[in-house]
Amino acid sequence: MIKSNRFLKGTGKVLLYLLLIICAVVMIFPLYTGVLTSLLGPENISTYPPKIFPVDFRWQNYIDAARQAPLLRFILNSFIQSGGVMILQLITASLAAFAFAFLPFKGKNFVFLIFLSTMMIPWESTIIPNYLFIQKIGWDDTYMGLIAPFMATAFGTFLLRQFFMSIPKDLYDAAKIDGCSNLRFLIKILLPLARPALGTLAVYSFLQTYNQYLWPLLITNSTNMRTVQIGITMLQVFEREQWQIVLAGVVTIMIPTLILFIVANRQLIRGLTAGAIKG
Amino acid sequence: MESKVNLQSKPSMHRLRELKDWLRAFPFLAPSLIVFTIFVFVPLIRSVIMSLYGTNPIGQMTNFVGLKYYQRLFTSPAYINSMLVTLKFVLYTVPAVLIFGLLLATLGNLRLKGISIFRVLFSLTIAISGATAALIFMFLYHPLIGIFNYLLSLVGISSIPWLISTKWALIAVAIPRIWLQTGFATVLLLAGMQGISEEYYEAAKIDGAGFWQSWRHITLPLITPSLFFLLVVTTLGAFQTFTEVNVLTGGGPVNSTEVIVQEIYRSFYFNGQYGLASAQALILFVIILVLTIIQFGVLEKRVNYE
């Protein structure tokens, strides 16, 4: 009885591992073939059957990709946009979250509702007036135009507010008695304590912006201002059947976000699941 | 005499304090409120106004047309098509994402050696963008050198014309989306599962419950909130889908993948029909709003139950 039980447990475990491996292979497969193909020589790209296991390691494809399209420029543009959005969101969200968490004022619920309502308005339903407005003030094809609409975030404000509210109010009262101004308290005491929450928001907003597609597609015209996601589809159009070069470009622009994922996995996941906890 | 003075000064003192509080809080709220006003609220109102006007090619409003665009949209085969395509896209992606997410989260929640590596592999797609995913799949779908058709040929299935047939194109657009969203779903559901107290499982074990029974009667009910949140978020996301369609098919072939946002994009960016596109965008807004309200309604109910 005991023996057969242990036996079942053993095979059960093997089966579970098998299932885990199958699932992992399925999830990784597109990425794997992307990397594999990006390293194929031109003679191996168009031969049948397609390669499923690595045969070449032609790093030259990456250099070629960077030569065919200004990939580094695209990455720089995306870093400026994503970095700008990230910093500005951190500033605006921590200011607002401080007011929500620590300052008493009438109509707080109403202001909170205003913030909340921005999360229910899909970006696509305001995109036409935004596009016309950015054009009108001459910010199309500029970093300002790429960054401006995303300078504030209701989601980030709620995320930080949640964290600020976990900090004892006594700390604030004590600082006030010592003659500390609100802004000074926020910068010198609150923000250093809130580093984990700030990290979560930073990683989350950087990734979201780096992966944006529709807005940069509308707002950038010149090749030099294109962000990675738009630039990479241009590479595909130019390189038609040179898939090893297109995929070398795809892998290149994915590297920053994959590194971010590996390094800041926990922050990122906290950011993504915060929405669920908040409801 | 004294009390009379007090009665008069109290409300005004109160007012003054309120005003002072406001003046103190406002500078902290102002940056966000200004951004929201310029880029969310004013554009939303302008969208409503624009949807009632004719426009010239650079988007300036010319003549009032009333509800003409809305009338036209609800009788336009192209628009009805884009609604149906989007609904189909929701049906193709959302249930699949929920099922795969549940499967991967359940596996990732097992107490096995090396499970954290699998968790990372399962959630990796949250770092990948729609555009890059679409490009990789475009290669996988390639009619001649694509790996999918090759793999199908190995098991004796004839080639599928992924992106060029009206029957398959929407499925082909849905697959990378499912792939990307499954990572997100896994992360979310896994977080929900890890929040369940160990005590429940131990109690169930004592009562002789097997793995399947504990999963069915403990895990599943307790992650219902996460599952419901996921359902809403993926449904909203699917209604707003654009990137994969734009990269893979551009709405074709023969409008078989023309989703709502692709239709909006075409209307105003290529055809210069700003008013019409605004009307389309507002209909999308109403759909999203209704879905969000339903979410809040159901959540409210759930809270009351507890």
Image (cartoon, coloured by chain):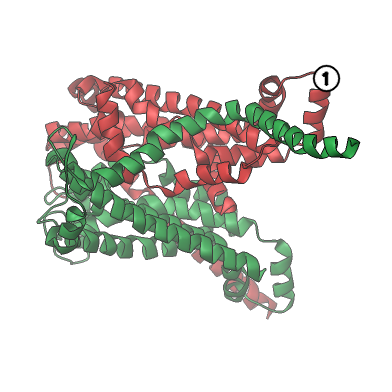
Chain colours: A red, B green
In the figure, is residue B69 to the left or right of A9?
left
- Residue at the (55%, 32%) spot, across then down: A93
B198 above or below A108? below
Callout 1, which amino acid?
Asp
- Residue at the (53%, 49%) spot, across then down: A275
* Placement of the N terminus of chain A among the 4 image quadrants: bottom right
- Residue at the (70%, 73%) spot, across then down: B205
In the figure, is residue A18 to the left or right of A133?
right
Query: Where is residue A69 drawn, in percent x and y?
Result: 20, 24
Residue A138 versus residue B54: which sits nearer the camera?
Answer: B54
A74 above or below A127? above
Residue A127 versus residue A26: which sits nearer the camera?
Answer: A127
Query: Where is residue A79 drawn, in percent x and y?
Result: 39, 24
Query: Farthest residue toward the right?
Result: B2
Query: Farthest residue toward the left?
Result: B254
For the question of whether residue B209 can be seen, the reply is yes
Query: Farthest residue toward the bottom?
Result: A1
Query: Where is residue B212 drawn, in percent x and y?
Result: 57, 74
Q: Label 1, on which residue?
A: A178
Query: Where is residue B265 drawn, in percent x and y?
Result: 21, 44
| Disc 1 secondary structure class | loop
